[in-house]
Amino acid sequence: ELLLGIDGLTVTPATGERVTQLRVQRAGLSGADLSVRLQAGDPSVWVDPQEDGVNLGMGTLQDGDEEEIAAALRKIVQG
């Protein structure tokens, strides 16, 4: 839910039999660029870069990680 409120991001469940990832896309940024920016942040966020976005693995998150990831993505979008 936290990611859905960030203007400029497209967030969809990654496809598969069991959906445990979210696909996050930002117009104008490749998956590699978005991944590099997330990794360079504090805290560093590691994702699975794809051609047109990144996949976030939900199974590896700890309590509170959602807020930190949303804040990192908001910072990237807002420049």
Image (spheres, grey):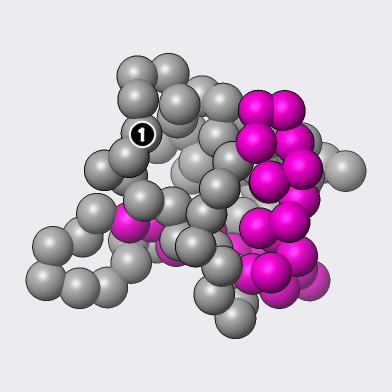
Q: Residue furthest left?
A: 17
Q: Which residues are magenta?
A: 21-44
The residue type indicated by label 1 comes to Leu
Q: Residues within 10 Å of mark 1 (few under 14, many from 20)?
A: few
The residue nearer to you, when weighing 53 against 5, is 53
Residue 19, magenta (yes or no)? no
Residue 58 versus residue 41 in the image, above or below: below
Relative side of 31 to 13, left or right: right
Q: Residue furthest top?
A: 64
User: From the image, which quarter does the C terminus lie in?
Assistant: top right
* Residue 53 can be seen, yes or no: yes
Residue at the disc numbered 1? 61
For image coordinates 35% across by 25% down, the residue present is 62
* Residue 11 can be seen, yes or no: no
Q: Residue furthest bottom?
A: 51
For image coordinates 50% across by 41% down, the residue present is 3
Relative side of 19 to 40, left or right: left
Q: Position of residue 44 (x, y in %)?
A: 65, 36
Q: Position of residue 70 (x, y in %)?
A: 57, 34
Q: Position of residue 11 (x, y in %)?
A: 47, 57
